[in-house]
Amino acid sequence: MWKVLGEKINLIQAGEIWKNRILELSRRKKGRPKFVKMLEEADVKYWFNTVDEVHVFFIKLPASYGSEEVKFMKDFIMKVIRSSADPVIEFAGEPLRYTVVITSEEEEDVYRGFSPPARNG
C-alpha cells in the first residue's frame, strides 16, 4: 500500500495528493496565506527516478518569483514535513527516499530556431 503523508494513494496521483496533504498540514503555520497563493500558482508534478530510486516532487513556480520566494517555499515545506508524524512517501509501511525540487527558472530552449543542415541529394 502506497501512502503520501499518511494518506493511501494510487501512485499516479502522488503529486496531487502530496500538494493537498501539504496544504492540509499547513493549516496552523505562520505564513500560510503566502504559501497557499504560491502553491496555487505552481505546477506540481511527481515522478520516480528509477536510476537513484528517489521519489521526486517537482514544484515549478512562475518566472516572476525570485530566489527569496523559492527559499520561503522551501523553508515552509520543510517546516510542514517535519511537523508531520507520517513519512512523505512510504510503501508497505517502509519510508522511501524522496526529494522536493522547487524552481522558478525558465528553461532556455537551445533548439529554438535550429534547422538541420540541408541534405545534398
Image: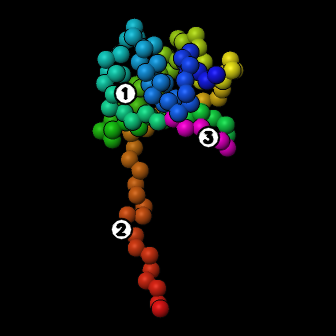
The numbered dot on residue 49 is 3
Does 49 lie within the magenta span?
A: yes
Against 48, residue 93 (above or below) is above
What secondary structure characterizes most of the magenta part? strand
Q: Nearer the viewer, mark 2 or mark 3?
A: 3
Residue 19, position in %: x, y? 44, 25
Identified by mark 2, the residue type is: Gly
Circle nearer the N terminus (3, 1): 1
Name the image quarter holding residue 10.
top right
The reply to whether dot 1 and dot 2 touch (C-beta < 8 Å) is no
The reply to whether dot 2 and dot 3 touch (C-beta < 8 Å) is no
Determine the residue positioned at 42% across, 26% down: 73
Does 25 lie within the magenta span?
A: no
Label 2 belongs to which residue? 113
Is residue 29 among the parts visible in the rendering?
yes
> Is residue 81 or residue 12 the one in the foreground?
12
Residue 23, position in %: x, y? 41, 18
Highlighted magenta segment, given as a residue range: 46-51
Determine the residue positioned at 40% across, 58% down: 109
Q: Quadrant of the N terminus?
A: top right
Is residue 75 among the parts visible in the rendering?
no
The crowd level at tag 2 (other Cα within 10 Å; few <14, some 14-19, many 20+) is: few
Identified by mark 1, the residue type is: Leu
Mark 2 residue element: loop
Mark 1 residue element: helix
Mark 3 residue element: strand
Q: Residue furthest bottom?
A: 121
